[in-house]
Amino acid sequence: MKVTLRQIEVFLAVANFSHVGKAAEALNISQSAVSMALSQFEEAVSEKLFDRSSRKIFLNDAGKKLLPFARKAYEAAAEVENFRSDGRVKGRLKIGASTTIGNYLLPFIIGGFAEKFPDTEIVMEVGNTAVISKGVMEHELDLGFTEGPVDEDEITEFFWRKDKLTVFAPVSFIEENYKPDKPVWIIREKGSGTREVFESAMEKADIGFKIKMELGHTEAIKKAVEAGLGIGCLSELAVSGEIGRGVFRRLNFKNADFSRDLNFIFRKDKHFTASMKALIDYCLKEGIKTAGYPD
């Protein structure tokens, strides 16, 4: 066979970064080694795979057609490398989680998973749903955990758990004085699953609202609400502790349905490794218990 795994790895890195220098840095090799491997790979497949400019390098039509086959070959080779005849799971996973899941569920779950499967390594990125879905789309993440819907033809959503949002205010807040059309809401940014569920629920319930402040982090919203700057709407997971300690109180919105699905997302063409299967199975069967999340 003319093609080597190193050449495929270099091809994938250059395709991802559209830059020889960045690919070399990611692979921890020299730029000349990247250029040589890429040239050898194009010679082996008898095709030019990139259009080159003075600063960047882009996949041409042939490169785009070859890309999914190269990814599958590289992932299958990783499975061979991680094969264990005793059935133990080995491998490295890059996962992404939207903010609530990444901050309040997965740290506990990953800890339990790592204890059960010590030969695995998990690298996690936390961002809003839009960021995580983009990472999965662009093959930067093996698996995503999201709180909002993802509308991409190349991505499959798989239901994991139910969650619900809670409207909350400082414990001293007087609910009778509240008027929904006043600009007192402190809400997550656009692209957040929490923001999308909140807006959809309020519109379906025909409840008017004006947003006073957008913040990109759950803890920042909680601090702003605690300081009396407005009321918020976050996952029950994020505010149940403060409600229990008497920092916040729930506000009653009977007509608004703030329930939502927590999902796994992955590319439809993704090769499922043993470690991916093990993590999903662990989340479904044991992860909720590990995180202390009620059924």
Image: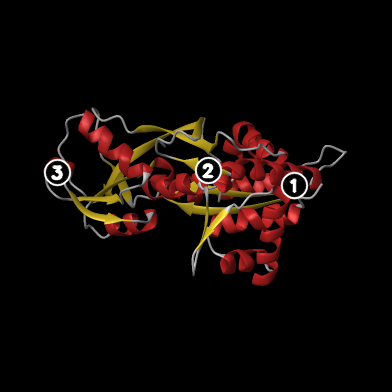
The amino acid sitting under disc 3 is Tyr
Sequence order check, earlier mark of 3 and 2: 2
- Counting from the top left corner in percent of width and height, residue 98 is at 45, 47
Disc 1 or disc 3, which is closer to the eye?
A: 1
User: What secondary structure is found at the residue carrying circle 1?
Assistant: helix
Up/down of 7 relative to 244, above or below: below
Instruction: Quickly name the residue at label 1.
Output: 78
CA separation in Å, label 3 and label 2: 38 Å
The colouring scheme, among rainbow, by chain, secondary structure or one colour, is secondary structure
- Counting from the top left corner in percent of width and height, residue 59 is at 53, 52
Up/down of 21 relative to 197, above or below: below
CA separation in Å, label 2 and label 1: 20 Å
Q: Which mark is residue 144?
A: 2
Q: Are marks 1 and 3 in contact (CB under 8 Å)?
A: no
Q: Residue at x 60, y 63 (%)?
A: 23
CA separation in Å, label 1 and label 3: 57 Å
Sequence order check, earlier mark of 1 and 3: 1
- Counting from the top left corner in percent of width and height, residue 187 is at 28, 50
The amino acid sitting under disc 2 is Gly
